[in-house]
Image: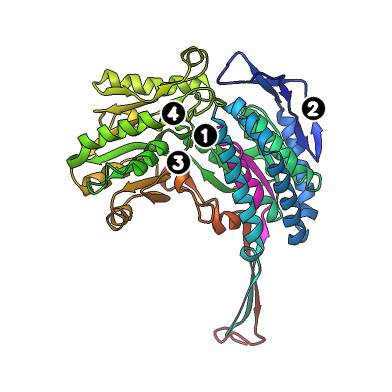
Amino acid sequence: MSKDPIKIDAIINGEKYKVEKQEPRENPTHPDEIVGYAPVNSREDTVKAIDVARETFITWRESPMDDRVERMRKAIQKIKDQTPEIAELLSREHGKPLYDSEGEIAVSLMWMEYACDNVQEVLKNEVQEHDSGKTIISRDAIGVVSAITPWNYPLSLSTIKMAPALLAGNTMVLKPSPLAPLAVSKVCEIISDEFPPGVLNLVHGEADVGVELTSNPKVAKIAFTGGTETAKHIMKSAADTIKNMTLELGGNDAAIVLKDFDVNDERAMRRLVISNFLTAGQICMIAKRIYVDRAIYDEFVEKYIDAANKWIRVGDPFGDNVTIGPVNNQKQVEHVQNLIDDAEGKGAKVIKLGEIMDEDLFEQGYFMHPTVVLGANQDDPIVKEEQFGPTVPILSFKDEQDAIRLANDSIYGLTSSVWGKEEHAVDVAKHIQAGTTMINTAAVQGLDVRFPFGGVKQSGIGREYGDEGLLAYTDTHVINIPDDKDLPYIPE
């Protein structure tokens, strides 16, 4: 589906901001095809965007909530109207199958609509009358928000920040990943057009842009989704001005399969396979390591491989019946392959899964044959590290305490899942260190935008989605109005 490359621009103060330097974005399915070009903004451009956002914030914070909601609803409708074009562009630049791109847009819209429906109730003033007088608790806008988003789910991980930030009365400067900048820029442009100039600004660029976004004293909050190592640099960069932060970081999410899990339940087994390989495994909350009770391990592996072979069909994102496309970029291919090679070199068994729909195309693009790894050890990199690709290790455990120990043996704690009889699974789930634990489902299949999402340990700080995701873009302001009486412990 080769087309002429598109060109996108930065947006500063409601205007397209053009620069000479452009960075091409290739098609992971056909790496010799350029899908489009994104600008490479300078640090000076970024300062300009932040200055505009700060100046705009002074008036935007005073705007009526009804007006903000109405503007966001208009943007939502325009995104709905343009979903086919946006989804196609996302699949071409990212590599995910078209159904997956459409699903990402659907989740983004679901969250944006939830935010519009609930923001006024969640952020309304709370008035308490008590024996000391009266107290008003208000939720005030914070200021300029720097949003930095990754390439794996660029639309949902940008709108998860844009919607609550703008609705709360903040202004924003957003920087998407150069590995998937095109579709998110189109969405950002749609939203920006519905708001006053300077409310939502968009910049692209390298590390110097990120440094400015995280260190500039006019930035009040940082909203970042990405790798834990990058987050450490961001925290250091922000330290001098003590910025508010929401960080949604890496995960090495464990799936525990109890001995009362029905291995003959084909639907449940397919859900587990999807939770490992959706978006070619490139999801922060995907199940990245499976622990199976020793009593059912052999039968589980047999049934799992059968289910994987039925569901996994690797090919062109626009091809019929394709469930998995290419990996997003060559660097990620190399990272995942190194983990697989390391495990195999240490004696693990690597089994290829599913069907390759077009061998010639497979050789051209950034494709990987999905694999399951058997016989790896807990300390092997393929188990300890976040693979972020189409491979998953399956290990056994001797009892539930062992399973809980293995699952918690990680610096990460984003999501997890437990598979088995519901009551039993919930009992086990209570002992897992994670921001979210799902029962008999995992990854996007178990996501609900009505409830908070985020990690523990080195998987992040703060929560997105749900009411907490709306409150995260506000400061709590307490106004005390005491009774006209003297305090008994202070002398006249």
Q: CA distance from mark 2 to mark 3?
A: 36 Å
**Residue underneath mark 3:** 285
Q: Tell me the mark number nearer the camera, choosing from 1 and 3.
A: 3
Q: Tell me the mark number nearer the camera, choosing from 4 and 2.
A: 4
Q: CA distance from mark 1 to mark 2?
A: 28 Å
Task: Name which residue lies at 22% across and 49% down.
Answer: 401
Give whichever of discs 1 and 3 has the lower sequence position: 1
Question: Which circle marks residue 18 in the picture?
Answer: 2
Give whichever of discs 2 and 3 has the lower sequence position: 2
Residue type (three-letter) at the residue carrying disc 2: Lys
**Residue underneath mark 4:** 389
Residue type (three-letter) at the residue carrying disc 4: Gly
Q: Secondary structure at mark 2?
A: loop
Q: Are marks 1 and 2 in contact (CB under 8 Å)?
A: no
Give whichever of discs 1 and 4 has the lower sequence position: 1
Give whichever of discs 1 and 2 has the lower sequence position: 2
Number of other residues with Cα within 10 Å of mark 4, as a class: few under 14, some 14 to 19, many 20 or more: many
Q: CA distance from mark 4 to mark 2?
A: 35 Å
**Residue underneath mark 1:** 230
Across and down, in percent, residue 402 comes to 22, 45
User: What range of the chain is rendered magenta?
Assistant: 140-164
In the rendered image, the quadrant that contains the C terminus is bottom right
Would you identify the image quadrant in which residue 90 lies? top right
Q: Tell me the mark number nearer the camera, choosing from 2 and 3.
A: 3
In the rendered image, the quadrant that contains the N terminus is top right
Give whichever of discs 3 and 4 has the lower sequence position: 3
Q: In the image, is residue 456 above or below residue 284?
A: below
